[in-house]
Structures are given as structure tokens and as C-alpha cells.
Image (cartoon, helix red, strand yellow):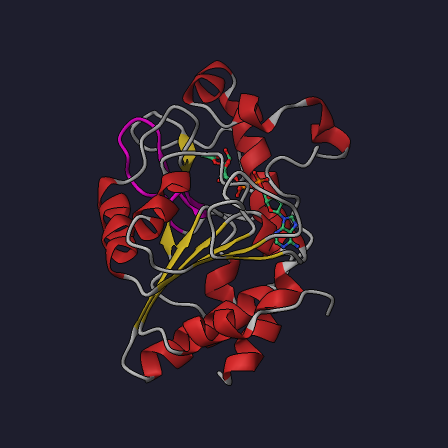
Amino acid sequence: MNTEIPEACIQAIANARHIVVLTGAGVSAESGILTFRDALEGLWAKYDPRELATPEAFERDPELVSRWYDMRRLMCRDTSPNPGHGAIADLQRRTERSGGTFTLLTQNIDGLHQRAGASDVIELHGSLWKWRCASCYTPATDLPEPLAEFPSPCACGGFLRPGVVWFGEALSHDDLTAAAAACDACDVFLSVGTSGVVYPVAGLIDLVSVRGAPTIEVNPDVTPQSGQVTWSLRGPAGEVLPALVDSIGA
Ligand code: OAD
């Protein structure tokens, strides 16, 4: 591994009793899932995700939007968690086993943290695996893979939509409240694989920095938050996180 992890950074994680980890699309990149801002290939290359992930797009073309999300759901089903997901789950077990608290916040909708063994994941932007009726909000269960119809009907006459947060939609108040409370109380904050440009999630790190608590960023690229974090670990999550967790003896 090429990324040097400062001893003080290792100690900050090793001694922390209350840890918050925030992940973005970058933690799933090594599982083969394109990050949000990567250009999509093939059939979907001509669509800009920011044009499909909106209530207006669904209203305008529910077939196209439900096909796009179902394609992403099946793509995620056919991928596997990578060592970065595994290291986060290991760190959660270690922290909770020693009586500490571990709050895993993710912007990802792929469900890979849970498949790697993490629990109580707060999916701030929802999940590809939780569809509901766009009209009556009834959750859909036992969805066929792939969906049988595009868009899929609800008994009320409405259409099923993915249970994800679209541009212009509010995040769950309860999730945001829980995330902010964890950030207000944590000993260390670890930001993994996010460009840190989409609010309100991108603002969570400020709740930690303002208290002078240590913050760590794991990202091969520089982000707008790189200048504010205590340590920037400039490398891929699938390499850096296992090395970090091995260093503390999870
Ligand atoms: P982005 O695609 O904006 O950013 C992914 C980040 O991961 C970038 O900073 C990459 O440098 C980094 N990255 C790439 N490969 C990596 C690796 N192997 N290990 C670690 N980091 C890596 O995705 P997000 O930040 O998750 O919101 O985007 C946040 C939100 O913007 C998404 O949830 C979505 C989008 O608007 C909604 O859809 C509501």
C-alpha cells in the first residue's frame, strides 16, 4: 500500500469510543459500481444521472426512470462488497465490542455495507432495495428481479418508485437528526469516498471540526474538505481502510 497512515491517526481511531463514519460512492468504486459523477457507459451514457434522479424526471417518464433504477439495483445485486466495506464492518464490531458507539452514515443506495456485515446503517439518501408507491407511499415488498413492468403499478393506481432521495427532495428528518447527534458527540469522524459537495450531508463534518475533534478523509483525490480535515489519507478505500483497521488490531 502506498498511503502512509500517521501514527497519531491510528491512535485517534484506536482510542476512540464514539466513531462516526460517513461514506460516499467512492467506497463502492472498487466493487465495480461507478461513482455518482463517473460518466455512465453504454445505454445510459447519454443520460446525465442528475437528469434522472429527480421527481420531475419520474413524473415525465416513469418508465425510463424505473428502468434506470432497476438496472442499477440489479447491477448492485451482482457486485460484492470490497475490503473497504469489510474493514468498516470490522471497525464497527471492534468499537461496539469494547462498549463504544459506531455510527455508519452512507450516501450510497447500493446496500453493500449491510452485505459486508455492517449493522444499523443510516442510508441518508435511501436505498435501491426499498421501493414504494409514489402516490400512496405503500412500501413495495418481494420485488421481482428484474421488475415485471416499467413502471410497476401499485394497487392504488399509482406507480412504484425507488426509495431514494432525489435532487430537490428532503432527507429523512429522523436520519439527519441522528446523524447530527452522532457528529456532535463523536471522538473521531472518518469520511470515506465522498466528493463532499452535496449538502446537507457535506456539512456534517463541520459539526466535528468546530469541536476540534479529529477528522480523517480517505480519498485518492483532493476534495473541498481536504483542507479542513486533520488527516487526509490519499488512497483507495479498499486499500487504506484494511490497513488502518489492521494497524489498530480490530
Ligand atoms: P461522487 O461521485 O460525487 O464522489 C465520489 C468520491 O469518491 C470522489 O471524491 C472520488 O475521488 C472518490 N473515490 C473514487 N474512487 C475511490 C476509492 N476507490 N476509494 C475512495 N474514494 C474514491 O459521489 P458522492 O460523494 O457519494 O446524491 O456523491 C454524493 C451524492 O451526490 C450522492 O449520494 C448523490 C449525488 O448527488 C443524490 O443522489 C441525492
Report x, y in % for residue 76.
59, 51
Q: Quadrant of the N terminus?
A: bottom right
Q: Is residue 127 magenta?
A: yes
Name the residue: 45% across, 76% down.
Answer: 11
Residue 85: image x %, image y %? 54, 65
Q: Position of residue 160 (x, y in %)?
A: 41, 33
Residue at coordinates 30% horizontally, 26% vertically from top-left? 135
Q: Which residues are magenta?
A: 124-141
Is 29 placed left or right of 197 in the picture? right
Q: Where 89 sits versus 183, above or below?
A: below
Q: Quadrant of residue 232?
A: bottom right
- Horizontally, residue 16 falls left or right of residue 86, namely left
Residue at the limit of the structure toward the right, as seen here? 42
Q: How many marks?
A: 0
Image coordinates of residue 238 in percent, x first then y, are 64, 64
Quarter, ligand 1: top right
The outermost residue toward the top is: 60
Name the one closer to the observer, 83 or 131.
83
Residue 32 magenta-highlighted: no
Identify which residue is drawn at 65% across, 46% down: 221
Nearer the observer, 123 or 151: 123
Quarter of the figure with residue 79:
bottom right
